[in-house]
Amino acid sequence: MLPTVKVAKATADNIARPHITLDSSVILLAFIFASAWTVTGAMAAQLPRILEAAGASRLEAISAGALVGPAQVAARIIEVSLLRRYHPLLSTKLACLMHPLGAAIVAITGGAGASLFAIFHGAGNGVITISRGSLPLAIFGPENYAYRIGIIGAAARMTQAAAPLGFGFLVDAMGSRVLLVSSALSLAAFAALFMLPERSPQPS
């Protein structure tokens, strides 16, 4: 059995890894999804606290949180039915605007806007989940797709993991004004999307 193991290891070692150029599109996508998933991770853990800090009762905050999931599903249905004919850049741009729009509603109405905020945030998050796969595919094509997705998503996995704790400290310090931070991240991702080409140029 030992020679077989050695042969298998040697074969695996000889398999060349795909060469993925870290061009501007890859870096921009990594930034976009890291920013978006920071907000996703933060809201998944801190949403009720933020809404209570904005003036919602505990019941209102919990009820609003329960709307995130249905909003995600509804947005995905709209994305695959009405927006499927358009480039994923469009749906991703719209998704990045949803959280800041919800935050603006909370800034104007306080806790009374908790449910609307949850719906807007959930809708954006639902589409971003799809965009994480569809947008790189549309820009780069299927070649080395899985390997490229891993590279693009590495930063997002780290920031999403750190977001609940980091935003927990921010909520303690800023209360509902922490939505300024999360909205700034979403808007930064939105701005970065305008620097992406619809398709990456082929190497000559």
Image: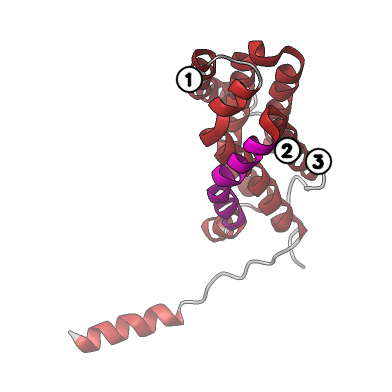
Q: What secondary structure do most residues of the magenta stretch adopt?
A: helix
Q: Quarter-wise, where is residue 24 in the image?
A: bottom right
Report the Cα–Cα distance between label 3 and label 2: 15 Å
* Mark 1, residue position: 66
Mark 2, residues whose alpha carbon is within 10 Å: few (<14), some, or many (≥20)?
some
Q: Quarter-wise, where is residue 115 in the image?
A: top right
Work out which residue is located at the far bottom of the displayed protein and give it.
3
Question: Along the line of sight, which residue is nearer the eye, 26 or 184?
Answer: 184
Report the Cα–Cα distance between label 2 and label 1: 23 Å
Dot 3 amino acid type: Ala
Report the Cα–Cα distance between label 3 and label 1: 30 Å
Percent position of residue 18, x then y? 56, 69
The quadrant of the picture occupied by the C terminus is bottom right
Q: Could you tell me if residue 64 is visible in this image? A: yes
Percent position of residue 47, x then y? 56, 29
Q: Secondary structure at mark 1?
A: loop
Mark 2 or 1, closer to the camera: 2
- Give the magenta part as a residue range: 154-173
Percent position of residue 77, x then y? 54, 22
Which numbered tag is attached to residue 120?
A: none
Which numbered tag is attached to residue 191?
A: 3
Dot 2 amino acid type: Val
Tell me: residue 146, above or below residue 178. below
* Mark 2, residue position: 181
The quadrant of the picture occupied by the N terminus is bottom left
